[in-house]
Image (cartoon, grey):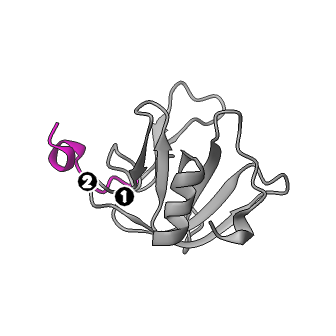
Amino acid sequence: MDSQLDGLKFDANGLIPAIIQDAGTHQVLMMAWMNRDSLAKTVATRQTHFFSRSRNKLWLKGESSGHVQNVKSIATDCDKDVLLIEVEQIGAACHDGFYSCFYRQHAAGAADWKIVGKKIFDPAQVYKK
């Protein structure tokens, strides 16, 4: 792995949270977990790879949808226990079809969550489920 990424602090399960941000707009697109292998693949391919805790395996963002993320930069926080990855998002980041996974907003005093994001695709068409 890139020597600049040495010293990162992975949790007891060998994972580190990765916040994914649009490199152009700086909009937060998603958060996912990485382990050493997924981070090494991300660095090597310049496309985001993550670790699925529920499936216990590595996955390439966009492997089902084609909506990949081309990595522009990788940063870490002062404690070196969180990653911030800036990407060029191709298509949408969210499996619900929205550009960002953070497409719901709850304002103070509001009764419910409001959809504020931009829907890019129909998940039923892309994932055929």
Residue 35: x %, y % from top left: 58, 47
Label whose residue precedes the other's in the sequence (2 or 1): 1
Provide the residue span drawn in magenta.
118-129
Number of numbered callouts drawn: 2
Quadrant position of residue 99? bottom left
Check disc 2 and report the residue beneath it: 121
Q: CA distance from mark 2 to mark 1?
A: 8 Å
Q: Position of residue 67 (x, y in %)?
A: 33, 61
Residue 111 in sight: yes
Judge from the rendering whether residue 35 lies leftward or rightward of residue 94; answer left or right: right
Mark 1 crowdedness (10 Å alpha carbons): few <14, some 14-19, many ≥20 = many
Amino acid type shown at disc 2: Phe
Of 116 and 56, nearer the camera is 56
From the top left corner, tell me how far across and down residue 97 is, in percent: 32, 49
Task: Determine the residue positioned at 35% across, 45% down.
Answer: 95
Q: Residue furthest top?
A: 111
Which residue is most to the right? 78
Residue at x 60% of width, y 52% of height: 36
Q: Secondary structure at mark 2?
A: loop
**Disc 1 element:** loop
Quadrant containing the N terminus is: bottom right
The disc at residue 92 is 1
Is 52 displayed left or right of 81 in the figure? left
Q: Locate residue 121, reporting x and y percent.
A: 25, 54
Task: Give the amino acid type for the residue marked by disc 1 in the picture.
Answer: Ala
The structure residue drawn at horizontal position 49% and vertical position 50%, both measured from the top left corner, is: 50
| Left or right side of 7 for 43 | left
On the rendered structure, is 90 left or right of 26?
left
Q: Disc 2 vs disc 1: Cβ atoms closer than 8 Å?
A: yes
